[in-house]
Image: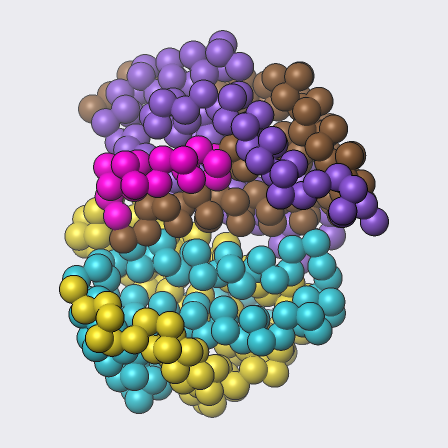
Chain colours: A brown, B purple, C yellow, D cyan
Amino acid sequence: MNHLIKEVIKFRDDRNWKQFHNPKDLAISLTLEASELLENFQWKNSEEATKENYQNLKDELADVAIYTLLLAHELDIDIEQAILDKLKKNAEKYPIESIWF
Amino acid sequence: MNHLIKEVIKFRDDRNWKQFHNPKDLAISLTLEASELLENFQWKNSEEATKENYQNLKDELADVAIYTLLLAHELDIDIEQAILDKLKKNAEKYPIESIWF
Amino acid sequence: MNHLIKEVIKFRDDRNWKQFHNPKDLAISLTLEASELLENFQWKNSEEATKENYQNLKDELADVAIYTLLLAHELDIDIEQAILDKLKKNAEKYPIESIWF
Amino acid sequence: MNHLIKEVIKFRDDRNWKQFHNPKDLAISLTLEASELLENFQWKNSEEATKENYQNLKDELADVAIYTLLLAHELDIDIEQAILDKLKKNAEKYPIESIWF
């Protein structure tokens, strides 16, 4: 993960974009990218969208991941640890035995 | 990254949730989680939100990352490679010299 | 429409909320409400969602409409005229004869 | 409001689009339009966005309103009544005396 974060930050700094990257605007960008991803599924089912828009899905999902890394970096969040902590929290919320169906 | 993907998939399979995880609904979930993240900034500036909602920001950003990994897995996308490819594409779209300001 | 706008603005002013209602935060609120509406369809098809979540769909759609009126008011947009203008623009973009299928 | 709903439905039926307009996809479209509206505020404050993107804000807000009317129609919701009901509900949730500040 660390090498990805380095690449993303390098891309940002090469363009002097740190000045724009306050957490609120990065969180806005993340919802915009998630919407652009979702747009690929508009008026389509999963199979049609995957077949017709595969490269675009890949690009938009990458954009979501890039903004996730940028926002984590800006907020000083260790995203790997945050994922593991959240999975643990979710596991308490949804214990295995009670929800199997 | 691979160990994170394994943890996320294990969490899903322990709960037998694969049956629900079609790409369209996962893309919907990703926008919902991005919105829950953004909600922390509603009526607040970045500093206030970061100070008042730090743990929640961490949790919601982790949820965005988890759904990103789930959707990548479902679409058979290597997310690390997708990020590197997208950064390259973005670098062509925004060449360094033309946008410095 | 005018009586609805008056009701919405009265609700806001009774609570002294105008101070928070800058257009950027209202636009954020609009995406949050649209997401809460969409959440009713998560992991469900249209029929299931409509059957199981009808009252909630009604409430969330009303919230979207309320924020639309608030933002229009704040931006000094006549929303009725804006709708008619946009339909005209869309009609030029999608002429009837070319898209029937 | 009724004449607006008629115009919107006429636009849809002239293009034979009713076949695509299931509630789930309309709810997706609503979040997409709300995001396109929000995009006008990306990296900008309210004043900059309003000044630079006024016509686009008007167009996107109209799109949000159009999809709101389409979805209300599809779900057989009287949107005027829904707004009034929701304002009443919100008034109970946020009583006037307790929240003035």
D89 relative position to A41: left or right: right
Residue B18 vs residue C36, the one in the foreground: B18
Residue lying at 42% horizontally and 40% vertically, measured from the top left: A56
Residue at the right extreme? B101
**In the figure, residue A98 lies in which quadrant?**
top left
Point out the stretch of residues depicted in magenta.
A44-61
| Residue A66 higher or lower than D78, as above or below | above
**In the figure, residue B67 lies in which quadrant?**
top left
Residue lying at 61% horizontally and 17% vertically, measured from the top left: A1
Residue C94 locus on image (x, y percent):
32, 71
| Residue D2 higher or lower than C90, as above or below | below
Residue lying at 30% horizontally and 75% vertically, measured from the top left: C95
| Residue C42 higher or lower than B64, as above or below | below
Membership of A52 in magenta stretch: yes
Residue D53 vs residue B12, the one in the foreground: D53
B99 relative position to C53: left or right: right
Examine the rendering and report whether any part of residue C19 can be seen: no
Count of all numbered marks drawn on residues in the image: 0
Residue lying at 53% horizontally and 37% vertically, measured from the top left: A64
Residue at the top extreme? B3
Examine the rendering and report whether any part of residue A47 can be seen: yes
Residue C26 locus on image (x, y percent):
59, 65
Q: Main secondary structure of the magenta part?
A: helix
Residue B100 locus on image (x, y percent):
81, 45
Residue B37 locus on image (x, y percent):
57, 42
